Image: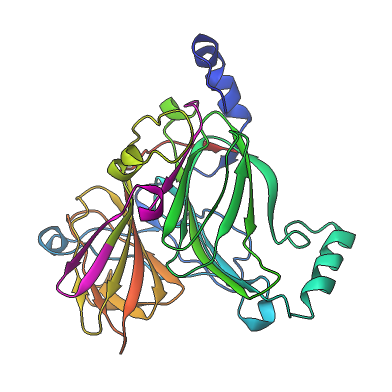
Amino acid sequence: MPCFALLAVAAQAAALSQWLKLPDINPGTFTRRDAATATGAALTAAAPVAASASQKTASRRAGDVQQWPRIPVWPSWAGGRVIPMGLPNADPFLLVAHHKHWFDPRDPLRGPFRAFGKATGLPYIDVEGFSMHPHRGFDILTYVLDGSDGFRHRDSLGGSKTYRGGSAQWMRTGSGAQHEEFWETSDERRTSIELFQVWVNLPASQKFDPPSIRYLGAAHGAPWHEEVVDGTRIRTVLDENIVAAASDGEGATPNQRPRAEVLHAWIPAGGKWAPKVGADSSCSLYCREGQVTVPGPGGGQVTVKAGESCGFASGADAISCTNAARGESDVLLLVGERLREPVAMG
């Protein structure tokens, strides 16, 4: 993923025009995703949600709750699935994918399934992962949840690593990189993997940054900041300080980008979480387990259940999230500075 200087500036406009174009992100709109029809979409356009006067002195209000398709993956008959989300009004966040898989050497269907994938040429089936493929123009966070087995990675920067639960990989694709990703499997035991992958747009001025990969988490010398507030445990998975402190990885020292933060919070039964997010930042919440209530567009509360998300309108510098389940609920929160630019990526 090299970056050239003077010639890159001259070629930048032409090169960007040839990249994959996604719809422009409208920072003032939200959308409702219909789970029955949204099996392959990425970003959608939508109906605006206005901030009320009372909202400016309280919590931001959420737009429509988004229901996402659960796409079966191996082992689909035992709960394997991926939930891909093109979050509306989430600029600079482009995509969030929630993966959950397990692989057992005693599973009699695994062999025939892989053979079927190889015979038909279906991607990602015969190899149980993602073969070498290119990206450019955005950042990728792959966050492996605590207790998970690993994700095996190899890239065009010369790196090769298996990173496991409680770790993450941050990748700036910039001017271009290739990588492959495979689920960790074993001939001796079952392996289970759950992770989030988050794609974050880069501003046009950084599309040709040199590529870089860094590994995050205590196992890689870049521990996350964690705190407990009124019983809620909050982990900052991604921010500029974490990336800047990371040294395990390959490629150039990354240039600082506009704000893009990912937080993971575990809220106890009856608990409430009210983080400060900034008045004009984009802010989206995904519920991984349990269910939470947030202020809704009509003045009351709306419920966000496991596998659902919501975005928050601008106007206040905080959000409010209350656990509505009998047990613990946990949520992923994405907060970023809006780029307000067309999306150009590959």
Name which residue lies at 31% across and 46% down: 239
Q: Is residue 5 above or below residue 341?
A: above
Looking at the picture, tell me which residue is in the foreground, 199 or 283: 199
| Farthest left residue in view | 57
Q: Give the range drawn in magenta.
A: 208-234
Looking at the picture, tell me which residue is in the foreground, 161 or 322: 161
Looking at the picture, tell me which residue is in the foreground, 328 or 155: 155
Q: Please identify the quarter of the rendering in which residue 331 is found.
A: bottom left
**x, y (%) of residue 123?**
76, 56
Left or right of residue 293: residue 106: right
**x, y (%) of residue 285?**
35, 64
Left or right of residue 223: residue 123: right
Asked whether 82 falls inside the magenta stretch, the response is no
Quadrant, the C terminus: top right
Q: Please identify the quarter of the rendering in which residue 291 is found.
A: bottom left
Name which residue lies at 28% across and 77% down: 293
Asked whether 214 falls inside the magenta stretch, the response is yes
**x, y (%) of residue 236?**
29, 56
Looking at the picture, tell me which residue is in the foreground, 123 or 228: 228
| Farthest bottom residue in view | 326
The number of discs equals 0
Q: Please identify the quarter of the rendering in which residue 257 is found.
A: top left
**x, y (%) of residue 114?**
80, 66
Q: In this view, does 162 lie above or below 104?
A: above
| Farthest right residue in view | 119
